[in-house]
Amino acid sequence: MRWRVLECHGKYSTIAMFLGLVVLLALVNVQLLSGVRHATWDADGFFAPAQMFVADFAQAGRLLLWNPWTNAGSPDGCDPQYGAFSPICVTFGFLTGGTKTGFNLYWLFIWLSGGPQHSRPN
């Protein structure tokens, strides 16, 4: 006996499945998107401020090379964790600005790309 769970034909079914996944991810994380919940651990303490910092530079039309406010000056652009030269990080920063909502959208995009999910109540 052959099981047919789902048959996909053509590019429209692939697009429909992707959009369904995006809607499902948004529905499951509606509390994160509305601000009721927020990122935890490293995402809250390091990556959110780092992405917002990169976003501020992107909106000013610059790339983050040097951070004069940390450790009496630090070459943060050389640290790959900042994503200062990542086209995805810089694009999200340019479009959403250095805000918590912008970071949450960037974080959801990373989840959609295969990253982990962690959130906690405020």
Image (cartoon, rainbow, N blue to C red):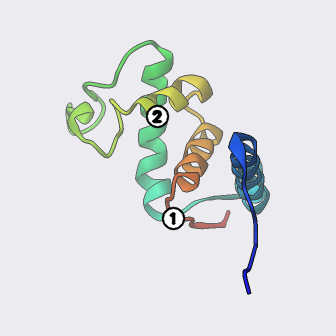
Mark 1 or mark 2: which comes first in sequence? 2
- Between 54 and 20, the one lying in front of the other is 20
Residue type at mark 2: give it.
Ile
Relative horizontal placement of residue 6, taking residue 75 as reference (left or right): right
The percent position of residue 111, horizontal first and vertical second, equals 56, 56
Q: Which image quarter holds the N terminus?
A: bottom right
| In-front residue for pair 35/113 | 113
The picture quadrant where one finds residue 90 is top left
Q: Is residue 41 above or below residue 97?
A: below
Residue 21, placed above or below residue 73: below
Q: Is residue 13 left or right of residue 70?
A: right
Q: What residue appears at the point 38 percent right and 15 percent down from the top-left corner?
A: 62
- Could you tell me if residue 36 is visible in this image? no
Q: Which residue is mark 1?
A: 116
Work out which quarter of the rendered image holds the C terminus and state it: bottom right
Which numbered circle lies on residue 88?
2
Q: Pointer 2: residues within 10 angstroms few (<14), some, or many (20+)?
A: some
Quarter of the image for residue 105 reads top right
Residue 12 in sight from this viewpoint:
yes
Q: Residue at x 45, y 21 (%)?
A: 58
Mark 1 surroundings: few (<14), some (14-19) or many (≥20) residues within 10 A: few
- Rounded to the nearest angstrom, the CA distance separating label 1 from label 2 is 18 Å
